[in-house]
Amino acid sequence: MAKKVSFFVFWLVQASALLVFFVPFTWPLVALWAVSHFLRAMGLTLSFHRYYAHRSFQMNRVARFIWTFIGVAAMQKGPLWWAGHHVNHHRFADREGDPHSPMVSGVYYAHIGWFLNDAKHDRIEATNPVIRDFSKVPEIAFLDRYFFLPPLMLAVTMFAIGGWPWLVWGFCLPTMTLAHSTFAINTVNHMFGSRRFDTIDESRNNPITAIFAVGEGWHNNHHRYQRSARNGFYWWEFDPTWYAIRTMQAVGLAWNVQPVPERIYAEAKATRERRAKKNDAVSVTEVVPIGLELAEDAE
C-alpha cells in the first residue's frame, strides 16, 4: 500500500509541472525555479553522494543535518536509502547487481523504474557501509524514515508565501527537473559523453548533465576515483558542489577533504597520449579492467 501511495504521489508531482503553462511567467519566478532546483541538487550531491556514499570530506553535525534536510527536500527518498543504493551501483557498476544500469536492465528501468516499483532494490542490506555507519544517528535515521516531511514542508511554504505561482515554480517544476537531472546520471552518463579513463563500466563525462546536476556529470572521472570530493577534476569542468565544499573548508565547516591523487592525473595524461598515438578512443571492452576504490577504502 505504501509503495502504491509513493508511486501515485511521485507521478502526481511530475505531472504537476505542467501547471507551469497555466500560471504567470515572470523572471523572478524563473529565479525561484533555479534556487529550488540547484540548492536541492546541491543537498543531494554534497550530502547524499559525496558525504554519505563516498566519505570524500567530513563536516560537523549541524552542517550535516542542514545539507541532508535540503537533500531530502528534493523528494528522492531518504539519505541512507539513496546513498546505500549508490554504493551498490559502484560495487556492481554495469553488471548484475547494479540497481540502475541501462546496459543490464534497459533505459526506462535504469532511469526511473528501479526508483519507483522494484522490490528487489527497495531495501538496503545491513552490511552496506552507509547503513552500518549512519543508521544509528537519530536525526539522520528520522529523515530517512520520514523522508516525505521536508518536501511537504517546502510545498506548503511555497504556497503560503506566493500561492499557486510559487507552488508551481518553486516546488512542482523544479522537483520534476531535479528528478530527471539526477536520474540522467544513471542513464545518459552511461551512454553519451567522453571517457577520459578506461574504467570497467560505461561511465562517461557529460558537460550538460554536469550543469543541471551541479557537477555530477563528470561521471567517468568519478567512477575512476570515487574518494575525491571533486568530480570535475580540472578547473574547466564545472563542479559547483566542489566549490561549495571548498568554501566550507575555508571557513572551517568541512575538513579531511579528499583530493584527486597525482597518480590519477598522471594516468589521465598517459591515456590521452596513448590514444593520440593510436588516434583511437578505446572502448571499455578493449581494455584490461582497472581497480576501483570503494567508498569505504582507505588511502
Image (cartoon, rainbow, N blue to C red):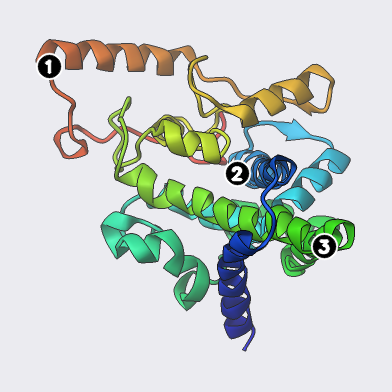
Q: Quadrant of residue 4?
A: bottom right
Where does the image place residue 56, in percent across and percent down from the top left?
A: 62, 32
Query: Is label 2 in a helix, a strand or a loop?
Result: helix
The residue depicted at 52 percent of the width and 50 percent of the height is 182
Does 234 sit left or right of 243 as displayed?
left
Q: Residues within 10 Å of mark 1 (few under 14, many from 20)?
A: few
Q: Measured along the vertical axis of the image, is residue 121 above or below residue 32?
A: below
Q: Mark 3 and mark 2 in contact (Cβ < 8 Å)?
A: no
Which quadrant: the N terminus? bottom right
Where does the image place residue 271, in percent across and percent down from the top left?
A: 26, 17
Amino acid under disc 1: Asn
The residue depicted at 55 percent of the width and 41 percent of the height is 213
**Location of mark 3 (residue):** 163
Where does the image place residue 35, in percent across and percent down from the top left?
A: 72, 41
The residue depicted at 29 percent of the width and 45 percent of the height is 191
- Label placed on residue 49: 2
**Location of mark 1 (residue):** 279
Q: Earlier in the sequence, mark 1 or mark 3?
A: 3
From where the camera sits, is residue 279 visible?
yes
Q: Quadrant of residue 212?
A: top right
From where the camera sits, is residue 76 visible?
no
Query: Is label 1 in a helix, a strand or a loop?
Result: loop
Question: Foreground residue, 259 or 235?
Answer: 235
Where does the image place residue 250, in percent across and percent down from the top left?
A: 79, 17
Amino acid under disc 2: His
